[in-house]
Amino acid sequence: MNPKPLKITALSVEELAQLLRQAGRRSISGQAVLAIAQKAGIVRDGGRINLIEYTAFLAREVAGGAD
């Protein structure tokens, strides 16, 4: 049986944390993911987070907050 496919526009905090851990070489907790998403103002109803919005926020932060 295949695992349930992820919906990248509506990930739970733990799904996003796991995805980021698998994609990178650093560990990140669900708590850290949630703190970043809350700072970005992108936590949706049910605690869901859009991976595209999350990534865009991180890119803006790295670029010095430029829009």
Image (tube, rainbow, N blue to C red):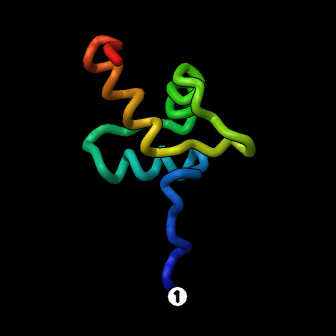
Residue located beneath label 1 in the image? 1
Q: Most extreme residue toward the bottom, as rendered? A: 1
* Left-right relation of 22 to 31: left
Residue under the image location 31 percent in, 28 percent down: 59
Q: Is residue 6 above or below residue 58?
A: below
- Seen in the picture, residue 37 relative to 4 is either above or below; the reply is above
Q: Nearer the viewer, residue 50 or 3?
A: 50
Q: Please identify the residue farthest to the right as the structure is shown.
A: 46
Q: Quadrant of the C terminus?
A: top left
How many numbered marks, from 0 up? 1
Residue 64: percent from left, percent from top: 29, 11
Find residue 13 and report its horizontal and vertical position in percent: 58, 43
Q: Position of residue 60 (x, y in %)?
A: 34, 22
For residue 65, which quarter of the picture? top left
Q: Position of residue 30 (x, y in %)?
A: 55, 38
Secondary structure under the numbered disc 1 in the rendered image: loop
> What residue is at 49 percent from the left and 36 percent from the top?
29
Q: Please name the residue shown 73% across and 42% down the image.
A: 45
Q: Crowding at label 1, few (<14), some or many (≥20) Cα neighbours within 10 Å?
A: few
Image quadrant where residue 54 sits: top left
Position above or below: 55 against 8: above
Q: Residue at x 63, y 34 (%)?
A: 43
Q: Amino acid at mark 1?
A: Met
In this rendering, position of residue 60 left or right of residue 2: left
In this rendered view, identify the residue nearer to me: 43 or 24.
43
